Image: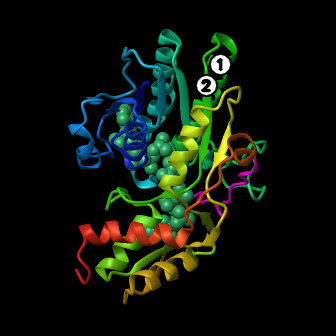
Amino acid sequence: MRILVTGGAGFIGSHLCERLLAEGNEVICLDNFFTGSKQNIEKLCDDHRFELIRHDITESILLEVDRIYNLACPASPIHYQYNPVKTIKTSVMGTINMLGLAKRVRARILQASTSEVYGDPQVHPQREEYWGNVNPIGIRSCYDEGKRVAETLMMDYHRQNGVDIRIIRIFNTYGPRMAVNDGRVVSNFIVQALKGEDITVYGEGKQTRSFCYVDDLVDGMIRMMECDGFTGPVNLGNSAETTIVDFARWIIRLTGSSSKVVYKELPADDPKQRQPDISLAQEKLDWRPKVDVETGLKKTIDYFSSLIPKGH
Ligand code: NAD
Ligand code: UDP
């Protein structure tokens, strides 16, 4: 198949492109390089089945493809809050453009949605039926509400125009190729630990997250794309939940770092708890994460160690 991956030069997108090529597909990677990088896809450029297009999905484009994975959107709070108007345009206008393309060339399209559609959840763990608790006017809204509208657009193009859609809700995912300056907790803590700098826990660190290794996520994404008769939304994530302060101690232990934990102000609207209920993914996709968090973290630490020599 010929497959378009928007946001293909980003963290998850680059792993997805690599896996789709390995499975024998032609891959078109489209990216505006806001948070993605050429290094992430450097190895793939030698493959004649791989094409790279510098393009912004807020502008329309016509390509002949069979599948569209729509991942383009900054995912880290510091990056999506840098230009919030652009962030929401990417999720709204960008998704309309990709849905228009899917409709015109009759491609199946998968939208990378997020656990953020549940906001600061009052139901725990989160199931797909839960409608969420999102602040529509806060500093995270450009991302959360943008993704919620993207889901709405997917469903309306499906009901109104018969577009073949898939929606996945991705929970916190980590692994090699996260940018050093990404700003999310996994890369921040590992980079700080490897440099011997203070580990910056926001608030008291009692908030929880559940971390999924990128290879598991990519496996779930492809299963969902190729699953017939099921549009989703479906949660994809790892159910192993940890508090952020315990996570900081875990990273210190795994890196053997002398770093100390320091406490910084908690950003506004930071969700207090998050854990996916993945029974729907298990039932429909026969999917569950295989990589335990300690193993995944060791691989991620190895990756960052190759970029940041210890004792820096
Ligand atoms: P990332 O920032 O590494 O990747 C996003 C990619 O999209 C980057 O390459 C960036 O340059 C590109 N991009 C951004 N705006 C664009 C635009 N307007 N036009 C074209 N390209 C654009 O983030 P990631 O972690 O790889 O996330 C990928 C997708 O998965 C995002 O849609 C994100 O919302 C979603 N997601 C990720 C997580 C996670 O934990 N990593 C969790 C939930 C959802
Ligand atoms: N966090 C932290 N220190 C950091 C970066 C993040 O304590 O240096 C916290 C953040 O406040 C949140 C959690 O870690 O409670 C996960 O943050 P991240 O930005 O990775 O993802 P999200 O909040 O979008 O789940």
Q: Residue at x 78, y 55 (%)?
A: 123
Q: Residue furthest bottom?
A: 258
Where 175 falls versus 287 (above or below)?
A: below
Q: Which label is found at residue 165?
A: 2
- Residue 282 in the image: state x and y as whole percent: 72, 48
Colouring method of the image: rainbow
- Residue 140 in the image: state x and y as whole percent: 54, 49
Count the labels in the image. 2
Q: Please name the amino acid that badge 2 sits on.
A: Ile
**Quadrant hosting residue 144:** top right
Magenta stretch prevailing secondary structure: loop
Report the magenta residues as a range.
268-279
Which residue does the numbered mark 1 point to in the structure image?
158
Q: Residue at x 44, y 61 (%)?
A: 184
Which quarter is ligand 1 in?
A: top left
* Cβ atoms under marks 1 and 2 closer than 8 Å: yes
Q: In the visual, does 131 lie left or right of 224? A: right
